[in-house]
Image (cartoon, rainbow, N blue to C red):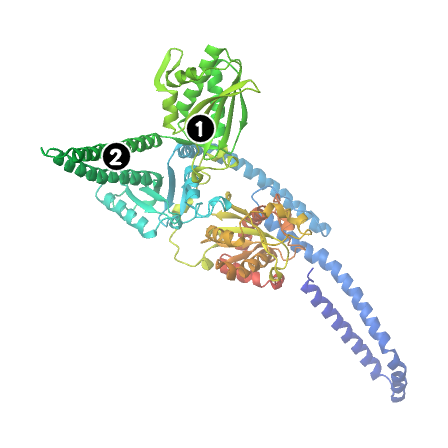
Amino acid sequence: MKTDRRLILAVAGVGLALLVWLGLIAAMVWSTLEGSERATLGNMQGPRLVLVAMGWFVALALVTAGLRVLLRRYASAPARLLEQARVLLAASEPQQIEPGGSSENRALAEAFNELATQRDRLRADMAEQIAQASRSVQQEKNRLAALMAELTQSVVVCNLDGRILLYNSRARLQFRALSQAPNLADGAELIGIGRSIYAVFDRQLVAHALESVHQRLGRGAANPSAQFVTTTRSGQLLRVQMAPVRESEGAARDGADVSGFVLMLDNVTRNFEEESLRDQLLHGLTERSRSSLANIQAAVDMLSLPDLETHMRERFLTVVRDEVQAMGQRITDLAARTAEGIKTRWPLEEMQGADLMLAAQRRIEAHSGRPVTLDSVDATVWLRVDSFTLLQALAYLAGRLVDEFEVKNLRLRLQTAGSRAQLDLIWAGRAMSTETVMTWEMDPMRFGAESTPLTVRDVIERHGGEMWFERERQRQEAFFRLLLPLASANEQMDATQIMHNESRPEYYDFDLFQTSSESSALDDRPLSELAYTVFDTETTGLNPSEGDEIIQIGAARIVNTRLLRQESFEQLIDPGRLIPAASIPIHGITQEMVKGQPNIEQVLPAFHAFAQDTVLVAHNAAFDMKFLQLLEGRTGIAFHNPVLDTLLLSAVVHPNQESHRLEAIAERFNITVLGRHTALGDAIVTAEVWLRLIPLLQEMGIRTVREAREAAQKTYYARLKY
């Protein structure tokens, strides 16, 4: 713990005063003595000066102890009370001061608490009134969120600087597919509130489209838009439609009222590949057929000669037969490929297999009146299906089983089988013949009085799948097995990521419409206007210069003084060395957990992209930044972002507090600590601390990143090195 400078100065002053006083007393006594008395006194005192010095030290120690008590009671306690009062003033949630110090100090703390209680009560009343007044606005926001959630198209709204203000879940999934490393931290480095759309699209391309929109506005177009097609760094082909966001309806048509733009994205990579393949097939058919026709024409010309010899006639007839057969085979192959293309072009949707099974269970029970149980449903399976017709086929098959074979119970099973999904409709009881199965498969499906021209075979062919019947003699069971297409890897999501409340846009921040172009450096921007990446690392040990490595990086983003919890980065890292057993109880990361995880050379580029154009914030940032700096040579990744340290800035704001550990600061700010000593957990707590520190720094006149860094470097803790 650092020693209070005021105590040092006070003790030094008192010690000097005692020396001066002793010197004056000695001088006064000396002046009254005769020469012989002075000699006698000198001889007597000389050997005893050590006792005088010891007495001076004892007196100084007693004074120091007294001063320490007085300083803590009457100087430090009021200073701490002042710091706590400032925290109380800036707190957005109800909070109380812990009384301490003298009776007057405790009474003052109680008075502050009473005032804070009154303020919190008034705040609650005001919040209730505001909530009542803004319900209609919230309804509009909810309608917007619901509308965005239902769109099957990726939608991103940006301001004129290209900063993202709003996006829907479809866009989040789309950007994950566009990531060069979609399996690292869920591809989180491309999309987020306040991030730049130019991380995906070329700036000049977007500027050209926006200029086209302005020109159409100038010509009086009511709903101007522009389209362009571009490729991404990951090799995906996107078709983009741009529409303007206007300040007000019926405003000037010269484009001056445009405050941003909406981008609607379609990934047309698959369509382009299919069109290219179809063109190649047609081109090949044309060229090879032209050659065959030329050969046939030549053979026919020769066959028309009256004096053609018999063996030559047979030879030319063979040529005609071979070429006709080859042309027929090519046309047959083309027809098959075209039919396959038609099947794949039927509108299929990506759907989680577990959701399809639940829907099938309800549909079959409603139509057949028999109970249906789900057996071994793989929750990670994502299908690409036409769910309506597929549910019709399953309900139809179940209905015929109940009507014709009096089946009492049915089961559904879903598993992966190589590159396809395996869906089984299972029952116990009588078996059936292959002819019966084929009849059911080819008959038009009927549901009571209703019918459809589609057959089960049509549904299976639409999906490019297969169906057959099998028996399990040992269990005395039988089942229909359907092979269905899986969603492509870029379209699949982990089942844990799909929650009902995530179907809406994760975040929107229309205040960013007011953001001006980034004309000034980050160092000179106000703290409240910046975007922050608050991060933390977990490591194998505390000595980065002696071979310790990062084993986890966690980060969260702050935009417009809002913590975006779901726009996070969290990734385990294989350190390429053993994790010391002594460190495992601290961070809870074992050797087994990092086995098979990507190494730091793979993870750091994704984290660098995630933190682009933001200020880095960490608690005891010198420790984390030392690891990142030592990795520059190995990875070629350098972090040039401005860095702020909540440890140092806490010491700036609260110089009289005894501890600036993360837990102590969180307790001071009434922040609930969850996930301590996990990288993301610590990053989120640090972000909450940073949001509390911003207004306190502004009260002290520290308003920019540069001023915050300069103030931090003057603190006692800035001397820590790694």
Find residue 42 and name its label: none
Give the amino acid at mark 1. Answer: Leu
Label 1 secondary element: strand
430 horizontally vs 236: left or right: right
Provide residue 174's location: percent of width, then percent of height.
41, 41
**Residue 277, quarter of picture:** top left
**Residue 314, quarter of picture:** top left
Give the residue displayed 56% in from the left and 38% down from the top: 122
Density class for disc 2 (Cα within 10 Å; few <14, some 14-19, many ≥20) is some
Give the residue displayed 30% in from the left and 33% down from the top: 333
Which of marks 2 and 1 precedes in the sequence?
A: 2
Provide residue 622's location: percent of width, then percent of height.
58, 59
Find residue 483 and name its label: 1
Judge depth for marks 1 and 2 and give the one in front: 2
652 horizontally vs 295: left or right: right
Find residue 326 and name its label: 2
Between marks 1 and 2, how big is the CA–CA gap? 33 Å
Provide residue 298's location: percent of width, then percent of height.
15, 38
In-front residue for pair 324/357: 324
Label 2 secondary element: helix
In-front residue for pair 557/255: 557
